[in-house]
Amino acid sequence: MTAVSTGSVLILGAASDMGRAIARRYAEAGRALILAARTPERLETDAADLRLRFKADVRTAAFDALDTAGHAAFLDGLGALPDTVVCVVGLLGDQGKSQRDAAVARRVIDTNLTGPASILGEAANRMEARGSGTIIGVSSVAGERGRASNYVYGAAKAGLTAFLSGLRNRLSRAGVQVITVKPGFVRTRMTEGMALPGALTAEPDEVARAVLAAQATGRDVIYVRPVWRLIMLVIRSLPEAVFKRTKL
Amino acid sequence: MKLSGWGRFPRVESRLVTARDQDDAVRAVAGGGPLIARGNGRAYGDAAIGPRTTLSLLGMDRMLGFDPDSGVLTCEAGVLLRDILGVFVPRGWFPPVTPGTKMVTVGGMIAADVHGKNHHAAGSFGDHVDSLDLLLADGRVVTCGPNRAPELFAATRGGMGLTGVILRASFRLIPVETGYIRQETLRADDLAGIMAMFEDSAGWTYSVAWIDCLAKGPRMGRSLLFRGEHARLDELPAAARARPLDVTLRRARTVPFDVPAIALNRLSVGAFNALYWRLGTPREELIDYDRFFYPLDSLLEWNRIYGRPGFTQYQCVLPLSTSADGLRALLSAIGAAGNASFLAVLKLFGRQDGLMSFPMEGYTLALDFPASTATLGLLLDLDAIVADHGGRLYLAKDARMGAALLRRGYPGLDGFQALRAAHGLAAVFRSVQSERLGL
């Protein structure tokens, strides 16, 4: 059982649809916010919105997930260590391009795994030393089994899922909560133009509500729409000999 | 994907693109169109469906600034009225004009130049807009308002998105002491009675009537008039005075009847209308603003009661001088056709200027019909009556009128088209509706 947090929330990837939705819900809950993204100027309208709607204490910060060398300094530069760090950084990429161009694949892997693991690892060390905090990583159901259509993205998310799992294992006795979020399909800029099945597709706000609920109730791993737990159970259970002939 | 308006008729294939910021909108417009901006899809017909591309502004939903001295709120076009109410009613502010649903966006309210129950006192929404940022076909963003590029502003309010993409707007909220409305209900026996009641109610801020459009003969036009004022603090019961702006306590509401269970035929609707009229005993009460302004919003997806084929709403306005005759002719035609209209609303508009704004001084009648061949035939008859009496139809609700009726009813049309041509807007900003109407 984890006490309901009240401290500040750092959102990495705050310009994304999920980041914006999560920021709104935390602001509504009265939490102070640090919105971080590569171009913080683009976060100013969101910050203004949160201040006006919720009278929230909001500031913005420049953060580049790929600049891992700068991650320690980024956290130290925030002043006080946030109570909660949410990482929504991600890049779906194009599987075809990733197959043809190793640099493209590398970028997908770095954005989904190397960068998040670096910044969350830095945050984890600081929270461990402090003895409190929550780390929330948005991973993906795509990390549960590699599929022909997006295995580079899936591999990176699999790595992130394992990283978060290990972090949770390590920090569970240190008073630091680690939550893995597997949203399934979400209607965002990333998926715009794709034909998404309505019953399986969440709105960004559903992800946000699930994140806050998971933190409040002390959940470890959440699927935003419960049906995904079942779907992924089936997909994970298929024997490889069968799975390799499927078109999932 | 297949897009439709709130009436679920028609459904049209269009590519839906979401703008999350100005750059997205600029990129979409740079594609050359034809496209139309879309808010929350509450226009009933095909006004917010692009013939090729539809640009959703729901991603641009940030409130940017508020000046508590003037009440001016600046926000992006995709902000929902629901959110404005949620944020600002507790702070003692209210939208200057509101349509009958709060599930609309600011951009949509300007594009349709929506009216409310206070049109006779406050005009339409566009009358309260100080300025707006409009994205034109060439990628320029122009700030316009009553005192800045006023021609562009005049064409944009009520212009159904055909002058460009509304990105942001600044408009004035009005101060309120409570979140409650002091409502009076009056009963009128016939058309002359309700028209007299409206004239007597000119001093009230809000007035609207529900009319039994199936009542015939001497009962034709029998109505219930609802008129209201924002309640002052000293008008609240003592218990509510501590938190006068908090109306969330009254969230749980039930509808007085089970809508989906009512088969929409002449008998059931006729019986319902008769009962409703009878139950509308003259009274005075305090109700929260949500119940007064948005009774249907509590029935989520109430548009589904008309089933798969969808429905169409018919809203016309007739000039004051012809209203009595015109309304009588409309009600006769509806009564004779026996085509049950579930919801019929009557309202007296005040004076209104504007190139393409719907309201004019006179009476407006709004009717819901299931989309069927019988309905479409009846609506053609109603069109003829409206045209003969110098009236016009509301573009935000229209899904089927012809170009001739539009031309007769909207004298500002030529000026509107000339402005669209002069700014190179006509080729880029088009909707399924504008193509149907030859706009």
Image (cartoon, rainbow, N blue to C red):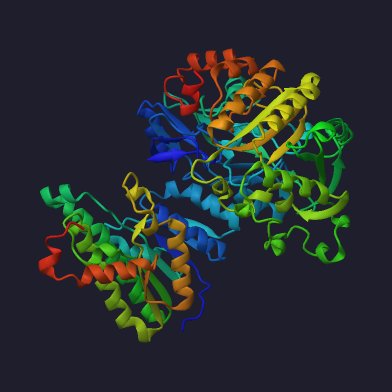
Camera-side residue: B91 or B105? B105
From where the camera sits, is residue A235 visible?
yes
Camera-side residue: B308 or B10? B308
Q: Residue at x 40, y 37 (%)?
A: B23
Q: Tell me the quadrant of the picture where the N terminus of chain B can be found.
A: top left
Q: Residue at x 60, y 32 (%)?
A: B112
Q: Quadrant of residue A89?
A: bottom left
Camera-side residue: A209 or A248? A248
Numbered marks: total: 0
Question: Is residue B334 depicted above or below A61 in this figure?
Answer: above
Residue B142 x %, y %: 52, 27
Left or right, A107 with reference to A30: left
From where the camera sits, is residue A69 visible?
no
Q: Residue at x 19, y 63 (%)?
A: A155
Question: Is residue B231 depicted above or below B311 in this figure?
Answer: below
Q: Quadrant of residue B12?
A: top left
Residue A157 x %, y %: 25, 64
Residue B229 x %, y %: 82, 46
Residue B111 x %, y %: 57, 31
Q: Residue at x 50, y 27 (%)?
A: B433
Left or right, B156 with reference to B36: right
